[in-house]
Structure formats: C-alpha cells, structure tokens
Image (cartoon, coloured by chain):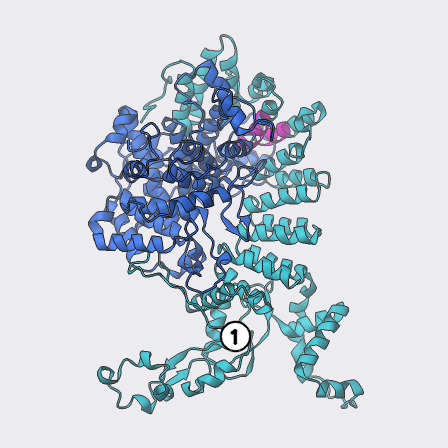
Chain colours: A cyan, B blue
Amino acid sequence: MSDYSDADSNADSFEPRLTSGEPTPEPQPTRVDNAIADATIERLKVALKTVCQENAQAKEIVSRILLGTLPGSNGSLKRKRYETCAHCEEEYSVEENEKGDCVYHPGRLAVQYGCLSRVSLMSSIGRKRIDVGSDTWADHDDEVHGDPETLMDEPGFMEGFMWDCCRRNGREEEDASGSDPTWADLTPLPTDEGSSTHPLAQIAYSPDYEETMSYLRALMAANELSPRALELTEDLIDMNPAHYTVWLYRSKILFALESDLYEELEWLNETALAHQKNYQIWHHRNLIIDKLGSCEGEAEFVGRMLERDAKNYHVWSYRQWLVRRFNLWEAGELEFTEKMLKEDVRNNSAWNHRWFVVNGKVAAMGVGDPKIRAREIRVAEEAIKKVAQNQSPWNYLRGIVKRCGLPLAELKGIAEQYASLEHPHSVRSSFALDLLAEILAEEEGGKEQAGRALDLLATRYDPVRKNYWAYRKSQLGMGELKQAVNVIA
Amino acid sequence: MSCTYSSASVLSSPDTPPGLDKKRHTRYWLRCLRTHLPSAYIPNDSNRMTLAFFTISALDLLSSLVPNTTPEERAAYIDWIYSCQIPSGGFRASPSHDLSAVKDGSAQWDPANVPATYFALATLLILGDDLNRVRRKETLKWLRCMQRDDGSFGETLVNGKIEGGMDTRFGYCATCVRYILRGKREGPDPTSEEQDTDVDALVECLRKAETYDGGMSEMPFHEAHAGFTYCAIAALHFIDRFPWPIRSQPSEGQRAFNKMPLRKEGIVSTTSSEQQGGIKTRGLTSPDLTIHWLASRLTATISSEDEEDTYADETDTPETCHDAHSFVHTANFPTSMGETSEKSRPTSHFALDWVGFNGRCNKVADTCYAFWVGAGLTLMNASRVIHPTPVRRYLLEQTAHIVGGFGKLPGDPPDVYHSYLGLAALSLLETAAQAAHESPREGRDKPVEERELKALDACMCVSIEAKSRLYAIWQRWGVHDGKDWDGGG
C-alpha cells in the first residue's frame, strides 16, 4: 500500500500531461525507442517488470499509470485502472466507465464496489441475451419452436441473441470466448445440489458468485497451482471469506509459485479491513508472517485495525501470537496496553492483553514476583480511582490474588475504600461491594455483614443481578433477600 | 441509556411479559425453508449445513415443522443432508465444496468438516431420521484424526494436516458428534471397535483456557468470551467430565476432584489415572467464579448508543457505565465536566424493563448471548441466577423483528443465526420461569401444548424431544447400557 501512497493525488495530473501544455518539438527516436516499437508485448511486459523491481521510482510511475482508485473507497483501495472487454476487445478505464458506455462493464463495477477483486475473469465472460429486434423471432412460436431461452446454443438461432457487453451478435460467440486464452481451456464446474428435490438453505447466488465458484471448483478439482488460480481465489474470498478450503488452497498456490509474500500482505491488509469479523484472514496472516520470519510493520497494522474496533477479538488474539512468535515481551507491549487503557479504561481486551504480557511468557513469574505484583496492583488501583464502576480492573485485582494463592481478604482495604457498610448510602462501586461481600463471607462471624452487602447490591446498587445476589445469599444459608420484591420471578 | 419505546410495538406491563408471536416467527422460518435466502447470505455459503440446522430446528422449537411440511419433503431434506456425507466419514458443510462428481477430482479440497458433521447429525435427529445411513465407524475414525496432541480439535483435515482454529467451538462440535454416535462412555467403542478420542487431553485443554476472571477463552491467555465459555461447559457435559453438581453438597473427595491440579504433560497418562481408582480430571477449576463471570454478563446496555462515549468522561453514569444500573455516589469529581454531567442527571436508577447479555466484559448486549450465557448457566445448574422476565422482554420487545426472527441489536434486521439463538434462549427462559414456580423436573416435563416453545436441551441446542430419539438409535447400535442416558427429560 505505502508504495502507492501518493498515487491518488497524482493520478489526475498524469493524463493531462499527455494532452495539454505547450507543444514541444518532437524528439528524435533513439535506438531504445525503436527497440520498444519493434518488441513483442510479452517482451515489453518482462522489461517493465524488471524496471519496477530494480527502481522504486519507476515502480511508482507505473503504479500511477496502471492502478486506479475504486469508486467510493476514499482513495484507499487500488485496483487495475484498465481492463479489456473480451467481447468488444476494447480497453476501458474502470474509473471512467459509466452506465451506457457498455452494458457489461458498469454491471461489473457495481459488484466490484467496496471489494478488491480484479475483474479479469469477469470481463472475459459476457452474457447472451435474447435480441428481441432480431428477425429470428419474427415468426417464432414458443409452443412450436420452444422457449427462446433454451435455444441459446442452437446453431440455427445464434442471430437471435446478442452479447450484453458490446451488443454484438450472438453468432460471434466463438470469437468472443476464444479471445481470452486465460480461461478458454477450463470447463466450469457448477455447484450441484445432489439428487435431492428439496435442498436446504439455498442462497440466491449472484451471477458473479455462481460463475466464480464454478471456475474455482474446476481449478480445485484439478488441484491447479497457477497464477490464474491465485487470482481467482481473491475474487472468491472477497465474496465468501468464510470458505474453509479456499484459504488453504491459496496458501498452497502461494508457496508453490514462490509468490511475493509482501504483495500478499498488502492484499491481506485490505481484505482484513473489509472483513473485520473473519478469522480465516488472521490464520492466513499467521502463515505468511511466520514464513517471512519478520513482523516488521505488523504492530502498525494491528494498530490500524484497533482504531476501527478497539475490542476486535481476532486482532487481539493475533497480537498475542506476534508477541510469542517474535519474543516481543519487552518490546513496548506494556506501554501499548497503557496507551489503549488511557484511551478507554473500560477496554477489557486491553486489560486482558496486559494480563497476558505480564503473565503469559513460559516460566514467567508474572505477578508471583512481589515487585511486579505491587506494580500491577498499583495500575489497577489507579484505574479504579479514575472510574470506580468498571468491572475490568476489579477482575484484574481478583486475578492477581488468585494467581498468587493469596486470600481474597488482601483486597479488603481497597474494597472498603469504595464500598463501606458503615456508609451504605455512599457506595461508589458495585464491584467493590460484591468483592466485600465475598471477603466478609469468608470471615468468622462475617456472614451477616456479607448478607447486608448482598441485600444492598440486589435492591440498590446492582438490581440487574438481583437473582444472582439472592443465589449468593442462599449459598451462605442466609435465606431470602431483605427489601427485595419478587426476588424469584 | 436511550429508551426505545417507539420501537416496541406493544408494551406489556412489567408484571406480564409479552407473548411470543409464534405465527410471525413461523412465517419467517418457512420463508427461509421454502425460498432462497437473500444474496446477503453468500458469505455464509460455506456454512449451509449450519443455516439448514437453524431453519429446521427453529421450526421444530415452534412446533411448526411437522404441520407445515409433508413426509416426502422431510425425506427430501434428509436426502440432501446425506448427499453432503463424505464416504470416509463426516459431512461437508455445503454442496459448493462437493467435488465428488469429478473423476479423480482432488478430494483434498473437499474434506469433512467438524461443525458441519454436528449440525448434520442434529438436523437428521430433528427430522426423525434413524441415522441408518450415517457412516458411523468411518466418522468415529475420522473424528479421532481431528484431535491434536494438545487435546484440541480442528475443523478439517487437509493434506494430513488438521486445519482451523484451536478454540472450544470445534471441541464442542466434536464432543457432540462423539456423544450422538457413541454416548458418554469412554474407551474403545464396543460395536465398531474404533478407539476413543483422548478425553483427558481435551479436559486439560479446556481447563487451560480458563481466564483470570472466571470465564473461558479461545486459547490460554486470550480474553474470556461467552461463546467459548458455553462451548467448553457443554463439551464437558458431553464427555461426562463436568465438575460435581455445585448445589449437591459434594463430599470431601468430590471437592478434591474438582480442585485437582492440571495434569503435567506426559507425566500422568490416561491409563495410569484410570488405575488410580478411576479418578478423572474434571473440567472448570473454579465453578463458583465461572457462575460469577456468567452472571456478570447481564447488562442493561442494550443498544449501541448506550455504549458510546466511554472515553474522557470519568464519572459514573448509565451512559458510560456498562454494568451499573444504579447511581453510584461520587465522593469527589475529578473534573468540572464530570460534576456538571453528574448533577444534570436523575437521582434514582431507571426501570429495568429490558436486560440483555453481553459476550465479554464492558460490551453491549447482543441477542445471541442470551443463549450462550443462559445455556451456560443452565448447564451449571444455576439458571435461577437470571430473572427471566426482563430478559424475555429484551428479546421480544427490543431485538425481535416485525417480520419475524431476531436481529443482533435493537432495530437490526433479522438473520437466521440471531433468530435461532433468540428462540433457543426464550425456550430456556420458559423452562427457568417454570422451574422457579415448580420443581425443575416438572418444568421440563410440562406438556408441549402448555409451553410456548418446545423445551430445549441446553447442551445439544435442539429440542429435548429431538434429542430423546437418540435412545432408540443407541439401543439399535448397541452402544447404550441404560446408565448413560440423561436426555429425554
């Protein structure tokens, strides 16, 4: 992505440069110019690729020319700017293509909006429609000659159809599909519902999805590990990221072709942002990063994801994996949790990550070390000072005491600071009161006081859980809650 | 806390909870059954067996399956499910993955899927199939291959590698498949002579995913999550390794079992622990803390507006505070902004008309967690810690949709996932409400016509009626000696 960061701002300035400005004298063609003019397209592609690989500036220029912005993506999503329609065989710019130019291309764009897939396969396959103006149908009687839809491939009826992309006659089908050698040899394999007359959970597939899936199935059945297969997995993943084997298939192709894994990461970044709740993406990312053996840039990417959703479960899980895999325990993780908690002290994912950073390393003493314990207790107490009615730091304190095998009574001091039975009208945290009830229940002769704390929770400070407080009280053998109405529904 | 009175069409008085509009929900599910699901489900094309399960099981819970389908139709649904069976054991999750029609097709990309196998078997039970066509021996063999050395289960087996996450979802589905095919008893299966999965290793794996705050997570040190917590608890039930019933006054010996430390890897083998008087490691190290964690998921924060702005405002108000539903006295104000904010608010807690469940600490409520948490508490024999009425009202007045079904949040359109789990949660609430008045057994046995929804088995997430069909099937298979049976009410 970063390679193309300024491509947007310059994208517009590129073409005017070709058409406007002071006329300049025509330069004399050099020997290189002549060589370019005579070279084959394939040779030129190889040459251009080499230039891009060897010169970052050149790569940027080429990006500007060949990559465009997807409509509606705020300039963040890139795709190829030029596509070739297989039927009219004309190149078109995906940015400038509008409704009416060609019936086919805009339809594609509508589907492409918001996703990242290339359209090379899509643009190579057109759809035949009935040409109602054709003489073929002038004397046609459905009853006698059959439904026109079923005659699409009948040699005698070709004239009655047209391609919806370029409005050319259906007779030209052979030329059209034969013009894209990429897919010509492949017979698509449509999904088959088995012999059942009543399949369950059928989905209204879009034509794009059906088509992409049928080609993917053909490729997977042949276990083809090729660039075109790699490209097709992208199309499918954009539509169905939860497909449980396409990711495995993709990684197999990637490794078999020894593809550029950094390019894969760029694509994954965009895909992860588009499908935030998908977990296969993160598993795939694990694979790629593990193979690369470097986590450079990963912290930044994780940060970007957390900006969108600071509690995204997959992202936090992935961050744990990074810390373990690259031994980042001391590399600013603790400071990172502090930053996240400063932004939102109620972010339980950040609290959990802190617990992991402190205690998760194999053979780590964690809070078992008195110094670390004191520090962590201080962090939780500071957070409680900021917001007393926040479950996360209270759970954190309980966790510390439990892990160290200390009695819960260690926390009596702080619990009473925020919830004192001597001042039942000025309780500042229901979680402190809950903790106090548990501590008192373990004290000799403390049951009655514990019961009072539970009554207060049920009737005043946490009535959402009144049945739970009643349950706790019954565990103490204390009978029903006082003041509580309809304790049990 | 925003009040969304306008979105609730009919408000009931606090004492009389609203009724479930069974006709409307039935219509929603019949649409799902008879017509194509909309294109928005394309990202779920690889989970069609799951969607099928939701559809069939929802209609079953509503007692609407048999009245609205013919025996021929149900037989066709059954055929469709069997068309997804893999000859070497297990089921695929969607016909889109089926490559069996291709001669010499690459079978590696069409593997059996663990969750799909659970959903297929459960749906077959609901449809009244006798499981005669299930490749039982092959499936048991395959299931064993799906378990990793650390005890966890994966999703698929591709090229000899177990793929998919390590989390408890797959452990749950795998133990349910094991339960359906061979009951709870450990050791080699007497009829097929297939070896058992490593039950001890799974228990260890589940115990390690307990978190410092009493919940369970996807992997050790990841954040506690209600979905993973439910899956772990239910899996322990399926393998008969749940802690001794918490309320049955366990003996000293039983207490010792519950608190047994984690087995050190490789030191105590399964057989030697069996030899020590049949003592087996049981799951959950601190059941009371787990109940505490589950009860803490109750929240009056039910719309996304409620959870905004936890930033910067450090005083405790219902808007900023996810778990307190009362006004907690603030001793002093850290900022003048906080003081102004506090003084402008009413001084008594708002009515607790609607109470939902969140999936993690300090998150907004979501329909599906009414099931994950409610069922978890039911399996902990602690459903009485929930007051059923406000949860019922939350589901029926806030997330139920006018066209039938349930959305994730108030005002969201319905989807089959939330719609099914909403019904499943309501069935459990109905059972809990009955149990509060009567003995639990009477609640479960109440005649169908007096209940709104069929009683749900909290562990298998199907009606108790559907689960009880297993009894005859087990007898036919010869895997049941009468002692294992706990289903059927």
Q: Nearer the viewer, residue B324 or B233?
A: B233
What range is drawn magenta here?
A: A380-398
Q: Is residue B19 left or right of residue A302?
A: left
Which residue does the image show at 26% across and 34% down from the upper left? B16
Chain identity of mark 1: A
Quarter of the image for residue A24 reads bottom right
Q: Nearer the viewer, residue B301 or A104?
A: A104
Say whether residue A474 is magenta. Answer: no
- In this orientation, does residue B250 appear? yes
Query: Residue A220, image x and y in percent?
Result: 51, 63
Query: Residue A488, image x and y in percent?
Result: 33, 24
Helix, strand or loop at label 1? It is: loop
Query: Residue A264, image x and y in percent?
Result: 63, 60
- The residue labelled by disc 1 is A183
- In this orientation, does residue A270 appear? no
Query: Residue A459, image x and y in percent?
Result: 40, 23
